[in-house]
Image (cartoon, rainbow, N blue to C red):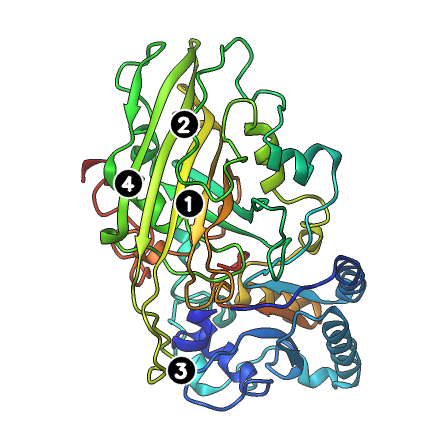
Amino acid sequence: MGRGIVPEQRTQRTVALAATLLVAVVPLLVVACASHQPPASPTRSRSDVAAGSNAASAAPAGIASEPQVAAHFNHANPAIVLSESTLVQLREYILPGAEDLAWETIPWRPSLWEAVVEGDRSDRPILLWAMNGHPLGCT
Amino acid sequence: MFRLQGEDDPECLYFQEIAEQGHYRGGPRGRTTRQGIYAFAASGRLLASINSLDPQRVAAMLESARKQWELLPTTQRGLTSATTSNATTSNATAVEGVDWRERMIGRQRWEWHCPKDGLVLETTSRDLPRVDGATPNQRPGAWNRDYAWFTNGEAESFLPAALELGAQQKLPQALAERLVRFHLVDNVRGQTQAFDPSDIVTATIETTVVRKTSTKVHLRLTGRTHAVGSREWRNHERPDEARPARERGMVCDILGYAVYDLDQRAFANFDAIAVGTRWGAALFNGRRDDTDPAPIGIALRLSKRHFVAPAFFQLYGWKGSQRPGAIPLEPDGDATQR
């Protein structure tokens, strides 16, 4: 499914508004579709990743680093090298940050019917977020 | 969502009755989408609905729903058998001594089959910086999440037979290919397609014991994958719409570490990433105008979230997973043996 850009500031405002409104409702999530900007962070600089600069090793303490994984496998950006020295930085770049995960602050129920029964018993309306793919991920 | 809008169990019929009051009402059941955001009373009365990612429009919809709720008489809010249609309630399986409300839970809940004693990974996908510093033409900050499941037996297949320092293990081909087909896919911008078995060019994942204690085995994971598909695009909602076959592919290198707890017979940690190149587009993954090769990254981490099934779980080949009504679901043989 194609989706438009959701500017970060507006997204934050809507999450805040939803959280306020949802105090009185039973939120239910069938599918969550996240389309947020990655948070700015000095530890996951775009230019650093592109340049393949060094970062702390991911190897457990006491383990000597293995030889660099052969990374040039027709990669579209040869500057991105997957190695022991870039593993942590690449991982941090990929993983969502706190702002990406703001939607998780709403206590979504993963099952429609469970939320309906809960809403019935507590006299609250239900909010359903349903997208193709599967629950809690826009796949 | 696909289940809710197309199946006929009580939970699905209940949803369809609500959706028929909303923004996509009309059309044959299961043949047109019902995606969106809905606010409704337990009685099935719709308060408001929308399908939009515009925060301001969604906020306005929520505000409208709140006002409608306040106007709704108390007698029309609650869930009663009288307010739920006969078609819905008659599909609820009768269980003596169980309240009819509890009986209406859907028959198909894939998360019921989560291998809690196995390995559950959370996957996160995101575009990586492009060679000239250019940003993607749309949604440059997009990322996505899915889950990968392994039975207990499959999880143990990550371990070498001899748990000695330096021992190596090649992941069974069926498991490596499952990862490539369903989890090393371009879903960054949304719903994508799995690769077919014939799309697999390379699927090699290996582990090496890099440390061992009396209770823990530390593994280093490496791998290389390559899949190229050119399956014709199919859209069941518009079967007459011609979609020429286009090539799409992924090549990835994998690197990471995992810790296996011998006492618990489970992974205590799993932290790996796949980095490589994607190209082409699937029907709904938002890449139609972004088909040139571009870098992509996918993180695979241990997850405690057991209520979300993998997007392509129905293709895992686990017994009964095509329509998983039975509980518990027994895996159809161990993928490590295939």
Residue B161 spot, x, y in % from top left: 26, 19
| In the image: residue B203, left or right of residue B288 | left
**Of pointers 1 and 3, the one earlier in the residue sequence:** 3
Q: Amino acid at mark 1?
A: Ala
Q: Is residue B115 visible?
A: no
For label 2, the SS is loop
- Do tags 1 and 3 sit on the same chain? yes
Residue drawn at x 44%, y 65% is B97
Q: CA distance from mark 2 to mark 1?
A: 25 Å
Q: Amino acid at mark 3?
A: Arg
Q: Chain of mark 3?
A: B
Residue A28 spot, x, y in % from top left: 61, 64
Q: Are marks 2 and 1 in contact (CB under 8 Å)?
A: no
Q: Which residue is mark 1?
A: B148
Q: CA distance from mark 1 to mark 4?
A: 19 Å
Q: Which mark is residue A70?
A: 2
Q: Nearer the viewer, mark 1 or mark 4?
A: 4
For label 4, the SS is strand
Q: Amino acid at mark 4?
A: Thr
Q: Nearer the viewer, mark 2 or mark 1?
A: 2
Q: CA distance from mark 2 to mark 4?
A: 15 Å
Q: CA distance from mark 2 to mark 3?
A: 47 Å
Q: Amino acid at mark 2?
A: Ala
Q: Which residue is mark 4?
A: B202
Q: Chain of mark 1?
A: B
Q: Residues within 10 Å of mark 2 (few under 14, many from 20)?
A: some
The one nearer the camera, B109 or A53, is A53
Q: As displayed, is residue B111 above or below residue A47? A: below
Residue B49 spot, x, y in % from top left: 65, 79
